[in-house]
Image: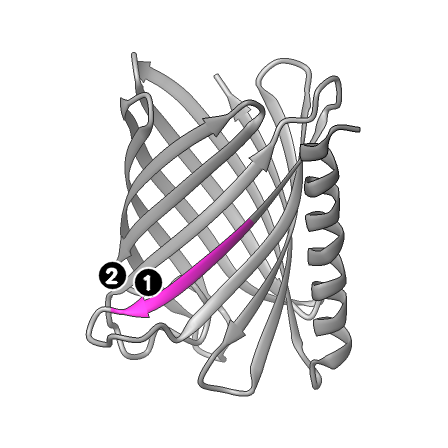
Amino acid sequence: MNKFSRITARTGAFLLLLFSGTLLYAQQPKTYERFEFELQFDLLPKLYLEINPEIRFANFLEFSELIMQGGLRYKAFKFLKLSGYYRFIGDYTNDDPEYLHRFAFDAEPEYEINRLELGLRLRYANYTDFAGETGNNKSYYRYRLQAKYDIRKFKFNPHISWELFQKSDEKSVYKGRYEIGVEYGFKKNNELEIFYFLQDYYNKDKLHHIIGIKYQLQL
């Protein structure tokens, strides 16, 4: 094992211990589950259409949200992707269902070092994407730093990320999201992803744990 691989393994072990400790520490944390499907079409060179249906649950039993999202992604340069999305959300967390419309725009610079891919995502959205946080109808900025590692001769590739949420009318961030996950590629243009989010509200004594499965097919 070379020096870089040892550093990667130690970093992954540290993050796993950090998440495990947070799970033990949290007082009656809420757990949410997400099941996603992503279908990608190549429309033109460097232009892609994405369709993403998603179902969300709370505490493993409570159906909370049904989402349908569509968007366009354009690879403007080798190191930069630009995207725009529309999302229709059915929020069933209350007795009276609420139906919402969200727009989001992304800029994603990327940089590769050997088999390590580093990416920064800058997102503007007209409101947050989490149930129970849409009442004030404020727009948001989101900043995500992600690292993926393509392990040689191994189909399971890990990734980690750190994302911050900021309301457009405030200077400080109010929420952070920490992710660890693994992607498995099988057959041609098929990919299965399993991920875990720890969502930390900095100004409140509140944590959310989010477990998800995502299947991706590229045509």
Of 86 and 14, nearer the camera is 14
Give the percent coordinates (x, y) of residue 211: 66, 57
Placement of 200 over or under 217, stated as above or below? below
Is residue 68 in the magenta section? no
Kind of residue sitting beneath label 1: Leu
Relative height, residue 53 to residue 141 (above, below): above
Residue receiving disc 2: 126
57 left or right of 117?
right
* Residue in view at x 33 percent, y 36 percent: 109
**Residue at x 57%, y 18% (from the top left corner):** 189
Label 1 CA crowd tier, 10 Å (few <14, some 14–19, many 20+)? some
Q: Which mark is residue 100?
A: 1
Q: Position of residue 26 (x, y in %)?
A: 69, 81
Q: Label 1's element?
A: strand
Label 2: how many Cα within 10 Å (few below 14, some 14–19, many 20+): some
Quick one: SS at disc 2? loop
For the magenta stretch, what is the residue range?
Answer: 161-167
Q: Main secondary structure of the magenta part?
A: strand
On whether residue 164 falls in the magenta region, the answer is: yes
Amino acid at pointer 2: Asn
- Left or right position of 161 against 77: right
Q: Quadrant of residue 7?
A: top right
Q: Quadrant of residue 78?
A: top left
Whether residue 217 sits left or right of residue 192 in the image: it is: left
Q: Could you give the CA–CA distance between mark 1 and mark 2, rounded to whole angstroms?
A: 11 Å
